[in-house]
Image (spheres, rainbow, N blue to C red):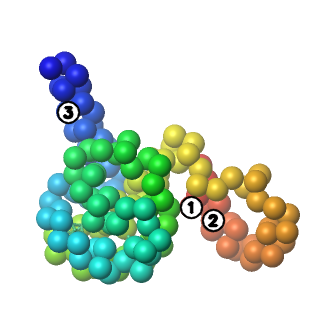
């Protein structure tokens, strides 16, 4: 019983934290999957945007910790403009990235990039990647 209450409290805290960071209420999502249909990156994602929203609704943020969905999100807002519930899903993805980065879960490690890759990549792309993928 105590464990169940603790889990429920953690879920509510996760949902509130996500709302605070994104300004969006994932609870109003009706699971229509329009976001997934609009997403140009969906094929590259472990979980579709709809699935991420579903897990976020239940406060299962920890279960989203190891997936690539919010890292692969290109912040194009195609999902956000079509969501029938008016959820800015791109902001939710950004909030999930922020939560991971605050726990020092970098998606890329600059020190592990090869000198050859660094020499080949446009500098502006490197800077943009470091801003998005590192804490
Ligand atoms: S488009 Fe909006 S309502 Fe539909 S699944 Fe995605 S987030 Fe939920
Ligand atoms: S903002 Fe992200 S999740 Fe939404 S359609 Fe674009 S790439 Fe997909």
Q: Residue 129 has which mark?
A: 2
Question: Ligand 1 lies in which image quarter?
Answer: bottom left
Q: Position of residue 115 (x, y in %)?
A: 85, 63
* 109, above or below 80, in the image: above
Q: Position of residue 70 (x, y in %)?
A: 44, 61
Circle 2 SS class: helix
Residue position for label 1: 132
Labelled pair 2, 1 in contact (Cβ < 8 Å): yes
Alpha carbons under labels 1 and 3: distance apart: 31 Å
Q: Is residue 114 left or right of residue 133?
A: right
Category of crowding for the residue at label 3, using alpha-carbon neighbours closer than 10 angstroms: few (below 14), some (14–19), many (at least 20): some
Category of crowding for the residue at label 1, using alpha-carbon neighbours closer than 10 angstroms: few (below 14), some (14–19), many (at least 20): some
Residue position for label 3: 8
Viewer-closest of 2 and 12: 2
Viewer-closest of 2 and 133: 2
From the image, state whether disc 3 or disc 2 is nearer to you.
3
Q: Is mark 1 within 8 Å of ligand 2?
A: no
If you read the primary sequence from the N terminus, does the residue marked by circle 3 or circle 2 appear first?
A: 3
User: Which residue is located at x 22 percent, y 51 percent?
Assistant: 57
* 77, above or below 26, in the image: below
Q: Is residue 43 left or right of residue 6?
A: right
Alpha carbons under labels 3 and 2: distance apart: 36 Å
Quarter of the rendering occupied by the N terminus: top left
Residue 80 visible within the image: no
């Amino acid at each position: 019983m105590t464990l169940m209450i603790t889990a429920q409290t953690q879920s509510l805290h996760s949902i509130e934290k996500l709302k605070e960071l994104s300004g969006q209420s994932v609870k109003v999502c009706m699971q229509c999957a329009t976001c997934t249909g609009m997403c140009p990156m969906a094929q590259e994602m472990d979980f579709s945007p709809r699935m991420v929203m579903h897990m976020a609704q239940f406060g299962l943020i920890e279960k989203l910790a190891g997936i690539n969905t919010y890292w692969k999100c290109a912040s194009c807002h195609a999902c956000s403009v079509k969501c029938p519930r008016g959820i800015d899903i791109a902001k939710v993805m950004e909030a999930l990235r922020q939560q991971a980065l605050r726990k020092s879960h970098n998606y890329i490690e600059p020190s592990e990039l090869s000198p050859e890759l660094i020499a080949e990549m446009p500098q502006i792309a490197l800077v943009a990647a470091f801003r998005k993928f590192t804490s």
